[in-house]
Amino acid sequence: MDADLASGIEASIGAQVRSVRLLQSQPQSELATRAGISLRSLRDLESGRGTTLRTLIHVLGALDQEGWLHTLAAHAEADEGGMASRGMASTGPP
């Protein structure tokens, strides 16, 4: 994946997380505590500076936005099914 594309995706996800947090009127410190992560990790996520998948999962759970994860998982399963039907092995991320 192109580095610019990855950075753009990180920034987009971070902005969406921030938007949901603000719609719920949650301060960053409160959300970080509810998610069980550091305030710095949340700030990094929201600013698109990179984070871990685990941090994203915890934050989405604390925001009651697990649907994002189910949508992503469904797409991943569909991709794996398509690869299997074409005789291709799933090797995970490039």
Image (cartoon, rainbow, N blue to C red):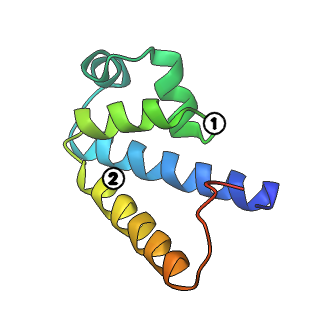
Q: Position of residue 22 (x, y in %)?
A: 31, 41
Q: Residue shown at 30%/23% (left/top)?
A: 35
Q: Position of residue 4 (x, y in %)?
A: 79, 58
As helix, strand or loop, the secondary structure at mark 2 comes to helix
Circle 2/circle 1 CB separation < 8 Å: no
Q: Earlier in the sequence, mark 2 or mark 1?
A: 1
- Residue 84's tag is none
Q: Residues within 10 Å of mark 2 (few under 14, many from 20)?
A: some
Query: Is 47 placed above or below 77 here?
Result: above
Quarter location, residue 47: top right
Q: Residue shown at 24%/48% (left/top)?
A: 65
Q: Position of residue 28 (x, y in %)?
A: 37, 24
Quarter location, residue 30: top left
As helix, strand or loop, the secondary structure at mark 1 comes to loop
In this rendering, would 55 be left or right of 30?
Answer: right
Residue topped by disc 2 = 69
In this rendering, would 9 be left or right of 77?
Answer: right
Most extreme residue toward the front, as rendered? Answer: 87
Q: Quadrant of the C terminus?
A: bottom right
Q: Amino acid at mark 1?
A: Gly
Q: Residue shown at 40%/17% (left/top)?
A: 37
In this rendering, would 84 be left or right of 1?
Answer: left
Task: Compare residues 76 and 2 and report the one nearer the observer.
Answer: 76
Q: Position of residue 87 (x, y in %)?
A: 59, 80
Q: Residue shown at 58%/33% (left/top)?
A: 51
Task: Compare residues 14 and 91 and report the one nearer the observer.
Answer: 91
Q: Quadrant of the N terminus?
A: bottom right
- Residue 50's tag is 1
Q: Residues within 10 Å of mark 1 (few under 14, many from 20)?
A: some
Q: Amino acid at mark 2?
A: Leu
Query: Is 63 placed above or below 7 here?
Result: above
Q: Could you give the CA–CA distance between mark 2 and mark 1, rounded to whole angstroms?
A: 18 Å
